Amino acid sequence: MNSKTPTAKPDIDPTTPLLLTAEAAAQALSVPEATVRNLHRTGQLRGIIIGKHLRFSPVALRSFVEHLDEEAESTDAAWTRAAATGS
């Protein structure tokens, strides 16, 4: 009888990359690669450094876009309020 508890295998799809290059992240965001690197350098986009290589997780990209979307909603609401008050 084996007394070892079976370990759960991570749910990883080998056809989907876990991390993206700056070039692939830029393509996913539809912006130039330099923009992705600048966003990372300024702390706006979370990246992972592996050795000398900068990589981005899909979760970090989604989080960044969600943050931008929230900011856009706030700006839209402010413009709507200003228009309603005639400011």
Image: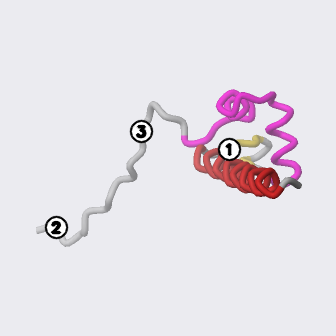
Q: Determine the residue located farthest toward the bottom in the rendered image.
A: 3
Q: Nearer the viewer, mark 1 or mark 2?
A: 1
On whether residue 40 falls in the magenta region, the answer is: yes
Badge 1 crowding class, 10 Å Cα cut-off, few under 14, some 14 to 19, many 20 or more, is: many
Badge 2 crowding class, 10 Å Cα cut-off, few under 14, some 14 to 19, many 20 or more, is: few
Which x, y percent locates residue 77? 72, 55
Is residue 80 in sight in this rendering?
Answer: yes
**Three-letter amino acid code of the residue under disc 1:** Phe
Q: Secondary structure at mark 2?
A: loop
Mark 3 touching mark 1, by CB under 8 A? no
Query: Could you say which quadrant of the image residue 43 lies in?
Result: bottom right
Query: Which segment did they paint magenta?
Result: 18-44
* Mark 3 / mark 2, whichever is N-terminal: 2
Residue in view at x 54 percent, y 36 percent: 17
Q: Nearer the viewer, mark 3 or mark 2?
A: 3
**Front position in the image: 31 or 34:** 31
Q: Secondary structure at mark 3?
A: loop
Which x, y percent locates residue 22? 74, 35
Q: Secondary structure at mark 1?
A: strand
The CA span between labels 1 and 2 is: 40 Å
Please give left or right for residue 38 compared with residue 24 in the image: right
Pointer 1: what residue?
Answer: 56
**Three-letter amino acid code of the residue under disc 2:** Asn
Residue in view at x 65 percent, y 31 percent: 28
Badge 3 crowding class, 10 Å Cα cut-off, few under 14, some 14 to 19, many 20 or more, is: few
The CA span between labels 3 and 1 is: 17 Å
Q: Quadrant of the C terminus?
A: bottom right
Query: Could you say which quadrant of the image residue 81 lies in?
Result: bottom right
Relative vertical location of residue 25 with respect to residue 1 in this rendering, above or below: above
Pointer 2: what residue?
Answer: 2
Number of numbered discs overlaid on the protein picture: 3
Residue in view at x 74 percent, y 51 percent: 80
